[in-house]
Amino acid sequence: AQKVTQAQTEISVVEKEDVTLDCVYETRDTTYYLFWYKQPPSGELVFLIRRNSFDEQNEISGRYSWNFQKSTSSFNFTITASQVVDSAVYFCALSGTFTGANSKLTFGKGITLSVRP
Amino acid sequence: EPEVTQTPSHQVTQMGQEVILRCVPISNHLYFYWYRQILGQKVEFLVSFYNNEISEKSEIFDDQFSVERPDGSNFTLKIRSTKLEDSAMYFCASYPGLAGPDTQYFGPGTRLTVL
């Protein structure tokens, strides 16, 4: 069975602070995929990143960066110089494949990030 | 850019009534999904659908739920006799298949309110 744990429930920071959102996962699959989604107050799910289990390179995209560590089963997300527009719920998710059985996304409970001006 | 659409955006119904939530996946996508999110909680998988049959379903997807792809464009989720606890946001998603994009494409959701 797959499981995603986001132990932090709510984080509040002041604008321009850096913030790290933690994600720990469990799976028996040898190949798997990890994701981060953003859910703004409007409710839609916005895809941010996918990481394959066989690719442990960290990734940076603008103010966003992701740290994937297989040894600790973690896939953490850092926002540098946070902005008010970053306020949202952030979900980490896991899937075993892209198609067919086991392609479902298993989500964590989400982290509510509030960025104050 | 192509997108998944869902109708209605908000549905209000009485307990015990049947509802049908509609989704139009992206054309030429082959894999379809329904997820739900109870207010303030995580997104939960309900069912996946491929080649006109269910590929996988969760424990939530019991006999009161059914899915159908009645024509080449729509993908529907039916709840036969709604309960108060069915109140949630329902997301449809689709995926093209092998060599596809990085993730499933999600629709904007249908908020179901059961009174």
Image: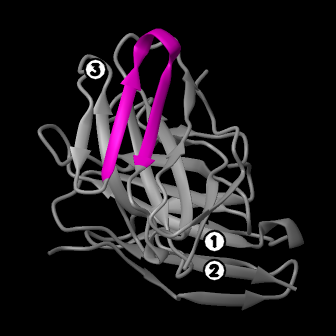
- Disc on the earlier residue, 2 or 1: 1
Q: Amino acid at mark 1?
A: Met
Q: Element under label 3?
A: loop
Q: Residues within 10 Å of mark 1 (few under 14, many from 20)?
A: many
Q: Residue at x 35, y 38 (%)?
A: A66
In this rendering, which labeled residue sits more in front, label 3 or label 1? Answer: 3
Residue contact between numbered discs 2 and 1, judged by CB atoms under 8 Å: yes
For the N terminus of chain A, the quadrant is: top right
Using residue A9 as the reference point, say whether residue B46 is left or right of it: left
Q: Residue at x 54, y 80 (%)?
A: A117
Q: Element under label 2?
A: strand
Q: Amino acid at mark 2?
A: Arg
Residue contact between numbered discs 3 and 2, judged by CB atoms under 8 Å: no
Name the residue tied to disc 2: B111
Q: Give residue B89's mark.
A: 1
- Answer above or below: position of B23 versus B35: below
- Examine the structure image and report whether residue B64 is included in the region drawn in magenta: no
Name the residue tied to disc 3: A56
Query: Measured from the top left, where is residue A39 in percent x and y?
Result: 51, 66
